[in-house]
Image (cartoon, rainbow, N blue to C red):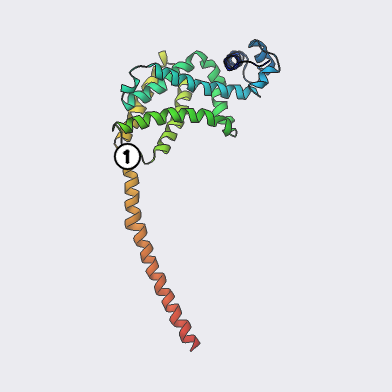
Amino acid sequence: MKISKEQKQKNRNKIILSAVDLITSKGLKAATMREIARQAGLGDATVYNYFPTKESIVYGYYEDKFDQVTDQLKKIKSFNEYTFQEQLQTFFETTLDLFWPEREFLEKTFKTTFFALSQHYSRIRPIKEKFMAIVEDIFQAAIEVGEIPDQVFKEMTIQFFWEYYIGIVIYWLKDDTDQFESTTVLIDKSIDLACTSIKAGIGNKIFDMGIFLFKNHVLSRMNFIKDHVDTIHGIKKKFMDAKND
């Protein structure tokens, strides 16, 4: 029997919630697809129509979280009035807030997902693309209003924030301070430093300096080398002509 898109989404959500619960209590290795299906109220075979393995359910969890983050940010009516720094900080804090109810699940899956199974990059890619899209929007909005200069290395900078995100989550998982105060301070100070560098256009200035050095030193030396090569070729030609005579 054909089911609606809404029911498919509900079934997918049930599977993920069931997996989160079982993996939290039993661990990733001990939890089985059959247990996940039955706790979700689905048939043993039905679960495979949605996810082929337990690991794919875990990837699905992290992918869905960024959809939830996007929804949460859209609900903030004045978000578009926030500064570039405030938007980035709110984004990371919102992500951790949504992770908090399943913190134990993250403790058992986060490193495995983003490190041990790094060979499965195709599975991580949809998660990363959703993350990058959010940060890209924040950057583009700030560039359009002139809050930050257009970035020569924008993709590289956004990639940095992906690595930063992974580092922040790992730090947060180890943070035992009250209300995760240490993580809050770390995000505040590190985002401030990053935004100060971006606003100052440090990446652009490094690029400009590189172009200057290339033009004034590398290219000039290439001309110098070319002159010497031409001289050597001229000497060789004279030598060959004299030898033939």
Q: Callout 1: helix, strand or loop? A: helix
| Image coordinates for residue 26, horizontal then vertical, percent | 63, 15
- Residue under label 1, please give it: 202
| Extreme-bottom residue of the structure | 245
Is residue 32 in view from this perspective?
no
**Residue 29 or residue 45, whichever sits in front:** 45
Horizontal side of residue 151 vs 61, given as left or right: left
Is residue 92 in view from this perspective?
yes
Instruction: Please tell me which residue is depicted at 31% across the width and 52% down the height of the picture.
Output: 212
| Extreme-right residue of the structure | 45
Instruction: Please tell me which residue is depicted at 62% across the width and 14% down the height of the picture.
Output: 22
In the picture shown, does residue 188 fall above or below 121?
above
Instruction: Please tell me which residue is depicted at 49% across the width and 31% down the height of the picture.
Output: 129
Q: Quadrant of residue 69?
A: top left
Q: Residues within 10 Å of mark 1 (few under 14, many from 20)?
A: few
Q: Amino acid at mark 1?
A: Ile
Horizontal side of residue 144 vs 92, given as left or right: left
Horizontal side of residue 3 vs 78, given as left or right: right
| Image coordinates for residue 123, horizontal then vertical, percent | 58, 30
Instruction: Please tell me which residue is depicted at 33% across the width and 56% down the height of the picture.
Output: 215
| Image coordinates for residue 60, horizontal then vertical, percent | 57, 23
**Residue 4 or residue 114, whichever sits in front:** 4
Q: Quadrant of the N terminus?
A: top right
State the count of labels.
1
| Image coordinates for residue 233, horizontal then vertical, percent | 44, 75
Q: Quadrant of residue 132?
A: top left
In the picture shown, does residue 98 fall above or below 224?
above
